[in-house]
Image: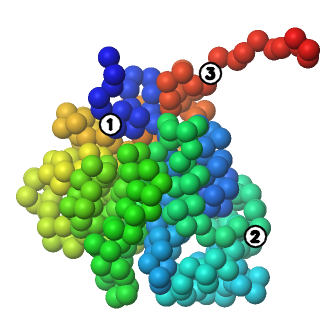
Amino acid sequence: MADTDPLSQLRGRPGIIRLHGHRGARGVLPENTLVSMRHALDCRLNAVEFDVRFSRDAVPVVTHDARLSPDIARGPDGRWLDAPGPAVNSLPLREIRQYRVGELRPGSAYAARFCDQAMVPETAIPTLDEVAALLAGDDRRGVWLNLEIKWDPHQDPDALPPERAIGAILDVLGARAMLGRTLIQSFDWRLLQELARQAPEVARSALSALPRPALGRPGNVFPASPLLAGFSPDDFAGSLPRMVQATGAAVWSPRHSDLTDDDLTLAHELGLIVNTWTVNAAKDIDRMIELGVDGIITDYPGRAQQRLAARSMSWRAGWPAAPQPEQRLGS
């Protein structure tokens, strides 16, 4: 009997937890680049996660920071940026393409954090269309795009209106026939509500982060949060799973350290898929496996694969494939 669940490739099942390569595979290759995403594809991951912002001419481009980061960006002159560069949405696409983002600035905290990341000089910021084209082939049908929209209207008065931002993304994905295997996530649930209005058939993922004031992390889940599209934890007795269900999103993506066993159990009872981010340390990967999440978003796909394999588990059915008998030359 055919599987009628359109999100079955994202749901966990006994012995299987799905793996999403964060920003491609940031732990080993430059973030949000085509080379990093190709690595995720070579690892046969279930999804490639990446960030989308917009150029001044409203082209969706794949990059994380609102301003070009001096930790990863060289300017058109080939030199490292001395400070945060221009806002991404202040530059037309032709100028964005002149920056190179294939290395980490020596001596930076970022370089120390990802000390095993390989250098790929001359790497440019890709467009969403280039990423969609990379994943659009018939041999990629089992791989999803996990697209996070970065949108900062309070910090950026020039941010595209939600309807234009969503429309621009849908135009690109529709032209590549990728809407059926794209998961769109955001910490700003207003974008998800706009997506539901324009394309209710596209899967939505509600990202969540509880405030951590001691760590300088404001989070997006608190009473009267402007990011929750009018939803409030107070209206759901503090239950994040019930609040996410009320938005109509099929997927909940909490920070891994926020997730409790009780919340995961309830989320699954409500039919939600639960993907946790960004899970890098072996002990944290182990905890997510033990809890039984559906998906793990990680900078280190190989590390997560090995932790699953150590438990005789996998990230996709029938993989790793059984080795084939060695053939002799001429046979």
Amino acid type, residue under disc 1 in the picture: Pro
Image quarter of residue 161: bottom left
Which label was assigned to residue 304? none
* Residue depicted at x 71% and y 85%: 76
- The colour scheme is rainbow
Q: Nearer the viewer, mark 2 or mark 1?
A: 1
Residue 217 appears in view: no
Dot 1 alpha-carbon crowd within 10 angstroms: few under 14, some 14 to 19, many 20 or more: few
Q: Quadrant location of the N terminus?
A: top left
Residue 118 appears in view: yes
Extreme residue toward the front, this view? 175
Question: Quick check: marks 3 and 1 in contact, CB under 8 Å?
Answer: no
Mark 2 / mark 1, whichever is N-terminal: 1
In 3D space, how far apart are the residues under numbered discs 3 and 2 (Cα atoms)?
A: 35 Å
Q: Position of residue 286 (x, y in %)?
A: 48, 36
Question: Quick check: marks 2 and 1 in contact, CB under 8 Å?
Answer: no
In 3D space, how far apart are the residues under numbered discs 3 and 1 (Cα atoms)?
A: 24 Å
Mark 3 / mark 2, whichever is N-terminal: 2
Q: Position of residue 167 (x, y in %)?
A: 34, 68
Q: Label 2, on which residue?
A: 122
Which label was assigned to residue 321? 3
- Residue toward you, 220 or 58: 58
**Dot 3: element:** loop
